Amino acid sequence: MSTIDIVIMAAGQGTRMKSQRPKVLHRLAGRPLLAYVLDGAAALGVRSVTIITGHGGAEVEAFCADWTRTGGATTPVQTVCQQPQLGTGHAVQQAAPLLPDDGVTLVLNGDVPLVRADTMRRLIDLCADRQIALLTVDTGEDAGAYGRIVRADDGERPVRAIVEARDATPAQRAITEWYSGVLAAPTRLLKKYLTLLTDDNAQREFYLTDVVRHAVAGGTLVQAMRIDDAVEVAGVNSPVQLAALEREVQRRHALRLMEGGVRLADPARFDLRGELDCGQDVEIDIGCVFEGRVSLGNGVRIGAHCVIVNARIEAKAVIHPFTHIDGGQNEVNVGAGALVGPFARLRPGARLGAEVHIGNFVEVKNSTLAAGAKANHLAYLGDATVGEHVNYGAGSITANYDGANKHRTVIEAGVHVGSNCVLVAPLTLGAGGTIGGGSTITRNTAAGALTVTRGRQISIANWRRPEKKKTGDPEV
Ligand code: UD1
Ligand code: MG
């Protein structure tokens, strides 16, 4: 197989997105478009990857550097700045000096995210070191703003040209086969035809697609490899196209999960923006969003409208509706058989053991709760270590922050914290102790003791509340 060099065009302004953000950094299912293209390229095993940057270049370059650092890229990624951006042909011209003549260049559009590595490989094979190979699609429907594939009339119908929608005659506009933005060409030929481009067209740009016309005129055969799946080659040029592709990607995620046995209440109301790993008999209700890495053990049930980010949820745990779990850099762990929510919030470093209960309006951050511990209503646990079978009363909080530093609260096994307590850290509540409701605890408590810090209750008999004056009462 030939030596492959990849060029990814990512310099365009993305005018139709009407956004400050460079188009290739807009997110599809939680990841920048360019990340998909880079992943596809990396899967091929190539000699070099060159990314053309321009509009928002610094941001795109920072993303590429980050991707190389974290993405396990085996091929170095280099960037070339295209300034000003005079079209896709002009973009590839900028990369030409970096491309050795002996290889095949695969040109990818940074805004066409879903092309499969296998498809790219077949396209390179078709190019066979001597002809230009184009990836095209024909759905039999109007090709919108895409470039039309113009073929000769003879039986073989070889490709004669790609005509951009804005330059097409009415007859050409009616052509339903369109160019995906992906081509493979022997580098020496590509370079030769790139030098012939002009900006003599509706957009006054140097079109890469004009390489085809010049190649045909120069006696180089141009082959089209037509695929049926328009989603694989869909380009993202506008918010409408981005949202349509997002739905399609989500539909595919949902199908894959359901084929693996996951019961989604409605595949059309499901969003995965990362990786979701599910055991057997997992049920997910409508409107849930999963981000980062999430794993759900056997028999886990997720109620409606939960947002779950970077978390491991073990077997038979139940997450009730409207719960927000976000592990950030520090994965949240929910133990087997735990019950969480509705309306609960688990923040980074929350680690719940088996059968833990976290109820409505309870927030847990950087805290470990051992098996069977319960905090069922309106409470905060931050920087706490909670022992087995602790019962943490409604409205109680750990005061973990003194304005400068965070401190830990240790609540040993079997402690019962009454309602509305303030536990001022650093603090240890001894095993099996009881804290009376409404107490503010500032010192460690002994195991087994009852500790109460509120004022003693007094009653004044026959207390008469003040009364409002009636009109006509004498002024005093
Ligand atoms: C392009 C093709 C069109 C094809 C479609 C597929 C051309 C002239 N047209 O149209 O035939 O059907 O893709 O999606 O190639 N870019 C640069 N520098 C520039 C201009 C663009 O790097 O000066 C980059 C963009 O960032 C983008 C890619 O090239 O990633 C394609 O540019 P875009 O303007 O989206 O071209 P389309 O109109 O989609
Ligand atoms: Mg485009």
Image (cartoon, rainbow, N blue to C red):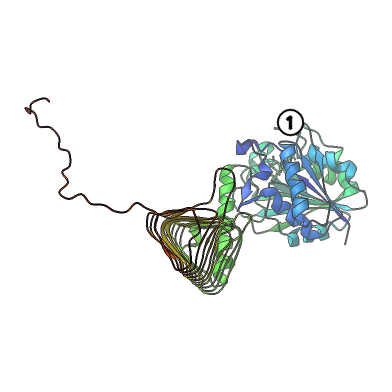
According to the picture, the residue beneath numbered tag 1 turns out to be 204
Q: Where does residue 272 sit, x and y in percent of width and height?
A: 57, 58
- Work out which quarter of the rendered image holds the C terminus and state it: top left
Q: Secondary structure at mark 1?
A: loop
Q: Where does residue 248 sit, x and y in percent of width and height?
A: 57, 56
Q: How many marks?
A: 1
Q: Hey, what amino acid is under mark 1?
A: Arg
| Residue 158 appears in the rendering | no
Decide: is 49 above or below 336.
above
In this view, the residue in front, 418 or 463, is: 463
Residue at 75% in and 60% down = 117
Residue at 75% in and 62% down = 118
- Work out which quarter of the rendered image holds the N terminus and state it: bottom right
Number of residues whose C-alpha sits closer than 10 Å to that of mark 1, classed few (under 14), some (14–19) or many (20 or more): few
- Left or right: residue 393 versus residue 52 is left
In this view, the residue in front, 464 or 402, is: 464
| Residue 309 appears in the rendering | yes
- Mark 1 within 8 Å of ligand 1, using the beta carbon: no
Q: Where does residue 284 sit, x and y in percent of width and height?
A: 49, 65
The single residue placed furthest to the left in the displayed view is: 472
- Left or right: residue 394 versus residue 135 is left
In this view, the residue in front, 284 or 341, is: 341
The single residue placed furthest to the top in the displayed view is: 475
Q: Where does residue 76 sit, x and y in percent of width and height?
A: 84, 51
Residue at 75% in and 54% down = 70
* Rendered image quadrant of residue 24: top right
